[in-house]
Every structure is written in structure tokens, then in C-alpha cells.
């Protein structure tokens, strides 16, 4: 459990550091209306993650098995989502193709979290532990994905010229497209960190129900 805890805590610290460095490297962001909320929300969720990680890695039994399985599937789905992030960031496509690609990667990720719960169920874990496996896979995935997304904001990705064409930017009242792009990255980080573990728990529980061994209720009749 200790290596799993260290991996998760290191990812949390990395994300907090990336947010802090990005804000300090572009302090004009702080002058934009409502910018503090964009910064605070992912930091609050990361603080919750810290507490959740400490709690989830403090016991053994079914949960230890679930976390081990979840870590493996979390790393796999993080790789899947990073591939999608790079395609979205660097490969220009039509809007329809972009939407279909996003849907395919999203469904694929959810299915893998379901498989994490299924594997936990097949190993005799309870449905609750299977939900933990899916949720933990999502936690690991999102921590890594968000860190990569935050790192890309230093490039910056998306470009300032592209951000300036967004209707959200024009309607926001902000005058700084760079600041809006950073805030948008923070907002995306917040939503991914918040929603990911919830979806992971649901899909993991479904996988656990499917994978749970069925006891044979038919008894042999005496001859």
C-alpha cells in the first residue's frame, strides 16, 4: 500500500505545484474578474484527494486488492487519455471528427474502469471493493492526465489566437486571452478531478456485479 500511496501523493503535489507555478508565471491572471475561483476549485479538490488517498490506503483486505487493480487500470487509462489530449491539441480535425474521437476515447476509458471492477469481482472482492477499484483507477488516471494538461498550458496549448475566437472568451468580459486560456485549463482540471472518481465508482460497481462469481444454487438430488 505504501508505494501506491506515494504514487498518488506525489501526483497530487505535482498538480498543486504546477498550478502555483503557472499562476506565478502569469500574474496577470489574478487581475481578471473571478480568476481566484478558477484557481481555488482544483486546489480544493486536490486537498480532498489528499484526504481520500490517506484514508483509502490505510487498510488492507479487499480494498488493498482493489487499489492494486485500480492502479494498473489507472495507468492504462491515463495513457489512453493522454493520447486523446495530444490528438485534440496537435492534430487539427473537423468538429464532427473531434466529437466522435472524444466520444470513442471517453467510452473506452469508462469501459476500462468497468473492467477494473470486473477483475476485482472475479477475484472475490465485494461490489463495494469493485467500485473502489474503478474509482481509484479514475483517481490515478485524472491525476496524471491533469498534470499533463497543466504542463501543456506553459506552451501554451491552446494558442492565444485560438482562445480569442472562443465565444466563451468574448462573452466573459476578459481582455486577456492568455489568462482565459489558463483559467480554462484550471476549470477543465477541476471538472475532470471532480467527475472522474464518481464515474469510476459507478462503472467499477457495474463491473463488480458482472464479475462476481455466481454460486450454484442447484443442489444435487439424492439418488
Image: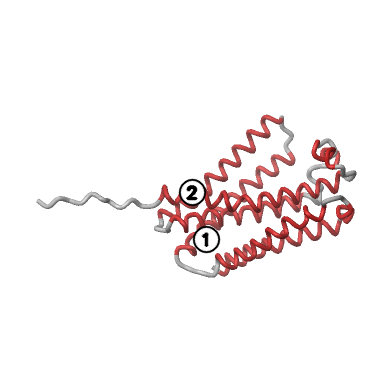
Instruction: Decide if residue 112 is on the left or right side of residue 223.
Output: right
* Total labels drawn: 2
Q: State yes or no: discs 1 and 2 in contact (Cβ < 8 Å).
A: no
Tell me which residue sits at (53%, 56%) in the image. Answer: 70
**Neighbour tally class for label 2: few under 14, some 14-19, many 20 plus, Cα within 10 Å:** many
Tell me which residue sits at (74%, 41%) in the image. Answer: 89
Question: Could you tell me residue 36's position as x and y percent?
Answer: 81, 56
First of labels 1, 2 by sequence position: 1
For label 1, the residue is: 67
Q: Could you tell me how far apart the alpha carbons at marks 1 and 2 are, in whole angstroms?
A: 14 Å
Q: Nearer the viewer, residue 66 or 33?
A: 33
Instruction: Decide if residue 181 is on the left or right side of residue 76.
Output: right
Q: Nearer the viewer, residue 155 or 20?
A: 20
Question: Could you tell me residue 134's position as x and y percent?
Answer: 53, 53
Tell me which residue sits at (47%, 55%) in the image. Answer: 130
Say how the picture is coloured: secondary structure
**Neighbour tally class for label 1: few under 14, some 14-19, many 20 plus, Cα within 10 Å:** many
Question: Could you tell me residue 138's position as x and y percent?
Answer: 59, 53
Tell me if residue 73 comes above or below residue 11 in the rendering.
Answer: above
Question: Could you tell me residue 215's position as x and y percent?
Answer: 30, 52
Q: Which mark is residue 115?
A: 2
Where disc 2 sits, the SS reads helix
Where disc 1 sits, the SS reads helix
Q: Give the farthest residue toward the left.
A: 223
Tell me if residue 96 comes above or below residue 135 in the rendering.
Answer: above
Quadrant of image for the N terminus: bottom right
Tell me which residue sits at (50%, 51%) in the image. Answer: 204
Amino acid at each position: 500500500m505504501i508505494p501506491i500511496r506515494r504514487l498518488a501523493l506525489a501526483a497530487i503535489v505535482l498538480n498543486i505545484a504546477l498550478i502555483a507555478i503557472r499562476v506565478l508565471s502569469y500574474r496577470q491572471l489574478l487581475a481578471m474578474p473571478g480568476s481566484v475561483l478558477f484557481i481555488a476549485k482544483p486546489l480544493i479538490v486536490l486537498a480532498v484527494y489528499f484526504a481520500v488517498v490517506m484514508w483509502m490506503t490505510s487498510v488492507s483486505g479487499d480494498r488493498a486488492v482493489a487499489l492494486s487493480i485500480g492502479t494498473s487500470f489507472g495507468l492504462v487509462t491515463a495513457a489512453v487519455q493522454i493520447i486523446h489530449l495530444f490528438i485534440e491539441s496537435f492534430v487539427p480535425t473537423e468538429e464532427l471528427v473531434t466529437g466522435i474521437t472524444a466520444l470513442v476515447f471517453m467510452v473506452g476509458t469508462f469501459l476500462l474502469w468497468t473492467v477494473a471492477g470486473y477483475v476485482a469481482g472475479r477475484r472475490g472482492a465485494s461490489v463495494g471493493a469493485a467500485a473502489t477499484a474503478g474509482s481509484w483507477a479514475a483517481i490515478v488516471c485524472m491525476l496524471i492526465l491533469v498534470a499533463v494538461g497543466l504542463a501543456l498550458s506553459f506552451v501554451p496549448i491552446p494558442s492565444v489566437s485560438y482562445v480569442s475566437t472562443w465565444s466563451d472568451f468574448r462573452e466573459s468580459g476578459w481582455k486577456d486571452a492568455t489568462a482565459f486560456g489558463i483559467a480554462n485549463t484550471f476549470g477543465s482540471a477541476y471538472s475532470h478531478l471532480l467527475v472522474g472518481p464518481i464515474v469510476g465508482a459507478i462503472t467499477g460497481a457495474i463491473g463488480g456485479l458482472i464479475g462476481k462469481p455466481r454460486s450454484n444454487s442447484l443442489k444435487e438430488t439424492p439418488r
